[in-house]
Amino acid sequence: MRSAVLGLVAAIALVTSATGCKGKGKGESKPATPSVATDPWAGADAAAAPAEAPVVPFLWEATKDGKTLYLLGTIHVGVDALTQLPPWVLAKLDAAPAFAMETDITDPGVVKLLVRTDGQTLEGELGPTDWARLREALGPALADGMNGMKPFAAMSALALKDLPMTAPMDSVLLARAQKAGKRIVFLETVAAQLAAIEPYATAADIKAILDHAAEAKGQSRAMIAAYLAGDAKALAALFDDQTFWVAAGRDPATYGAFVESTLTRRNRSWIAPLTAMADSGGGFVAVGAGHLVGPDHVPGMLAAAGFTVRRIEAP
């Protein structure tokens, strides 16, 4: 479960990590940036550079009526898009007339959506012991800056801790597309994405990660390894892991509702704009890899909509 949420929120987490609200929800916004060099929770290897090995890409080609979409699964953070993606993948982006990604994480309304309006604080929800553990994990400045924000923000920052710090793949690819003057398509609003994820990013989920820090780090390493290897089976298995779901006190029988909300329903909502993108001449699509390999994945939905779909691992 943590891997699924991590894959969904890491890009937005970079925004929340840099814009935590100072104080207990009543102060002004003030940037706060974590320092991995003084991180006592993740250990010295938190600042390790990303692997230099090239990625075996999670890339699909979907063709209909002579128009083609290329769908690239991203890992958001932890892989350098410009140096680790094969040049031939970037060439397909450069040749595409349009570029699509999940949502516009540069939307200035992102932070406003994460600020609490219920009068509570994260410190109050967690209690003194777990609040102290979170401050140790994230660093006092960053944790305090998120005290007036919804639990999603702190959980997102925890998700980033175990990944090599790179520029977000999605943002790098977006910047490349914008520089080339391509038409940009966002498949959903930030508000819609947060609405799907937030119910599963709670104080209980934060406690579960703090309680199982070693397992969290192991999952992050396994996810990077599976992504670099292009191993769809291994990556899908990580997205189906219920360790943190159960650790947060949830019934395993309800895990299906989480998958439906965070993956299946969103994937389904993307088929219409992707079809319209194809009808307009095709393009290049970059979304979290879990949307391409998990249950009810986008390639399968496009195939059901009449596209001829195949995975491409080499030029």
Image (cartoon, rainbow, N blue to C red):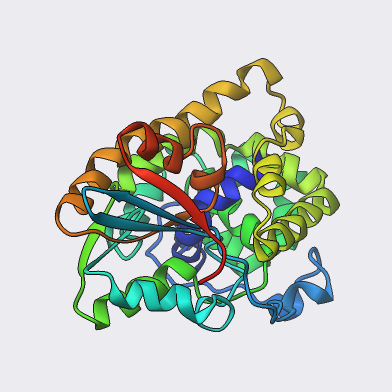
Name the residue located 47 percent from the left edge and 77 percent from the top edge: 88
Where residue 10 appears, x then y in whole percent?
53, 58
Q: How many tags in the picture? A: 0
28 or 222, which lies in front?
Answer: 222
How far across and down, in percent of the image, does residue 150 sit? 48, 45
**Residue sitting farthest toward the left:** 280
Quadrant where the N terminus is found in the figure:
top right
Q: Is residue 19 above or below residue 158?
A: below
172 left or right of 41?
left
Q: Nearer the viewer, residue 188 or 34?
A: 188
Residue sitting at the far front: 66
| Camera-nearest residue between 313 and 49 | 313
Q: Is residue 235 left or right of residue 291?
A: right
Q: Is residue 101 visible?
A: yes
Tell me which residue sits at (76%, 32%) in the image. Answer: 247
Q: Is residue 267 left or right of residue 179?
A: right
Name the residue nearer the viewer: 63 or 221. 63
Residue 24 in view: no
Question: Hey, which quadrant is residue 265 in on the image?
Answer: top left
Q: Identify the residue at image location x=77%, y=35%.
A: 243
Residue 252: x percent and y percent? 70, 20
